[in-house]
Amino acid sequence: MPLRSSMQAIFWLNAAVLATHQIDAAYWHEWELFRIPGGNQINLLLNLPIIAPLREQNAKDQS
């Protein structure tokens, strides 16, 4: 498997794990556990710094 295909597979696996975690976090009200004001919306916004660099790297790899 070429490196590009491996990296793309890892990217999609990571995205799937993150999506699954967000569903689980919403079920368990994770924002209350960490005392995050603003509820689920703020909790989701806090994940953008995690997602953005991965997405940018994936776009660079496809170029």
Image (cartoon, rainbow, N blue to C red):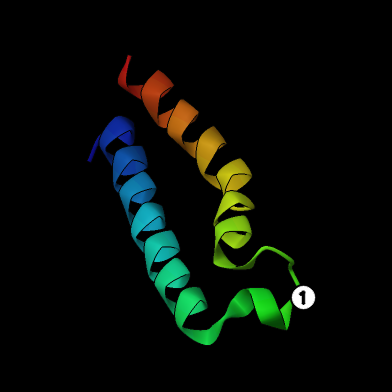
Amino acid type for the residue under numbered disc 1? Arg
Residue at the disc numbered 1:
35
50 and 3: which is toward the camera: 50
Q: Quadrant of the C terminus?
A: top left
In which image quadrant can residue 44 be found? bottom right
Q: Position of residue 61 (x, y in %)?
A: 38, 23
User: Height in image: 3 above or below 39?
Assistant: above
In which image quadrant can residue 5 be found? top left
Q: Residue at x 59, y 50 (%)?
A: 45
Q: Residue at x 46, y 70 (%)?
A: 21
Q: Position of residue 22 (x, y in %)?
A: 46, 67
Q: Is residue 48 left or right of residue 56?
A: right
Q: Quadrant of the N terminus?
A: top left
User: Height in image: 26 above or below 10?
Assistant: below
14 and 44: which is toward the camera: 44
Q: Position of residue 34 (x, y in %)?
A: 74, 76
